[in-house]
Image: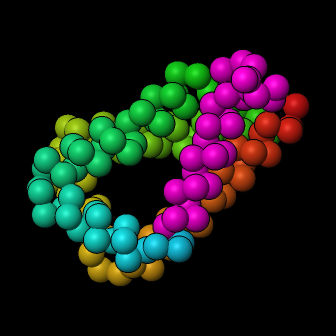
């Protein structure tokens, strides 16, 4: 089965990001404490935790967006910008893990950080969904 709205690379990426960002964003909002515990555990691992976070959660969406989604108009531009920012974050985390470790330390301060992050992810997911119909 194929999705009729995702026949080319760009709409496929938009569909993937709409579903993924929305699912994870809602999870951040409903279960902020679980996310806080998860990232606190990664933080305790030190540089290895930063590498795990980067390779598991961030690098692959960044690479997909940067290589397959260079759209610079309409709501899809938010995905493109997000992809480039995420790739930059990945580079810094991989090259200077201590910087990534400092950003992960913020998660230990408050679970509400994940609610805010969830809102951002939902906005990205909605922009991706809007991009599917904006043609």
Whether residue 123 is in magenta: the answer is no
Q: Nearer the viewer, residue 82 or 25?
A: 25
Q: Main secondary structure of the magenta part?
A: helix
Q: Is residue 25 magenta?
A: yes
Left-right relation of 57 to 66: left
On screen, 23 above or below 90? below
Q: Is residue 20 visible?
A: yes
Q: Residue at x 37, y 67 (%)?
A: 35
The one nearer the camera, 6 or 79, is: 6
Q: Does the rendering let one see residue 92?
A: no
Question: Where is the N terminus found, in terms of image quarters?
Answer: top right
Question: In the figure, is residue 35 to the left or right of 104?
Answer: right
Rendered image quadrant of residue 12: top right
Display colour scheme = rainbow
Q: Residue at x 73, y 23 (%)?
A: 2
| Marker count (numbered) | 0
From what the image shows, is residue 13 above or below residue 122?
A: above
Outermost top residue: 8
Judge from the rendering whether residue 38 lies leftward or rightward of residue 115; answer left or right: left
Task: Name the foreground residue: 64 vs 31.
Answer: 31
Q: Could you tell me residue 100's position as x and y percent?
A: 25, 53
Which x, y percent locates residue 68?
58, 22
Q: Position of residue 19 (x, y in %)?
A: 64, 46
Per the rendered image, the range of residues in magenta is 1-28
Residue plotted at (30% across, 38% down) = 55
Q: Quadrant of the C terminus?
A: top right
Q: Which residue sits at x=47%, y=43%?
A: 85
Relative image position of residue 130 (x, y in whole percent): 79, 45
Q: Nearer the viewer, residue 15 or 77?
A: 15
């Amino acid at each position: 089965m194929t999705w009729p709205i995702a026949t080319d690379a760009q709409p496929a990426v938009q569909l993937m990001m709409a579903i993924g960002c929305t699912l994870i964003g809602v999870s951040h909002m409903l279960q902020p404490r679980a996310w806080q515990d998860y990232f606190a555990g990664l933080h305790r691992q030190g540089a290895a935790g930063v590498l795990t976070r980067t390779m598991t959660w961030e690098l692959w969406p960044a690479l997909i967006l940067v290589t397959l989604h260079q759209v610079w108009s309409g709501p899809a531009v938010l995905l493109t910008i997000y992809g480039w920012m995420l790739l930059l974050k990945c580079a810094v985390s991989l090259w200077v893990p201590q910087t990534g470790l400092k950003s992960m330390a913020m998660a230990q301060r408050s679970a509400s950080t994940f609610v805010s992050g969830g809102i951002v992810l939902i906005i990205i997911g909605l922009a991706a969904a809007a991009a599917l119909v904006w043609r």
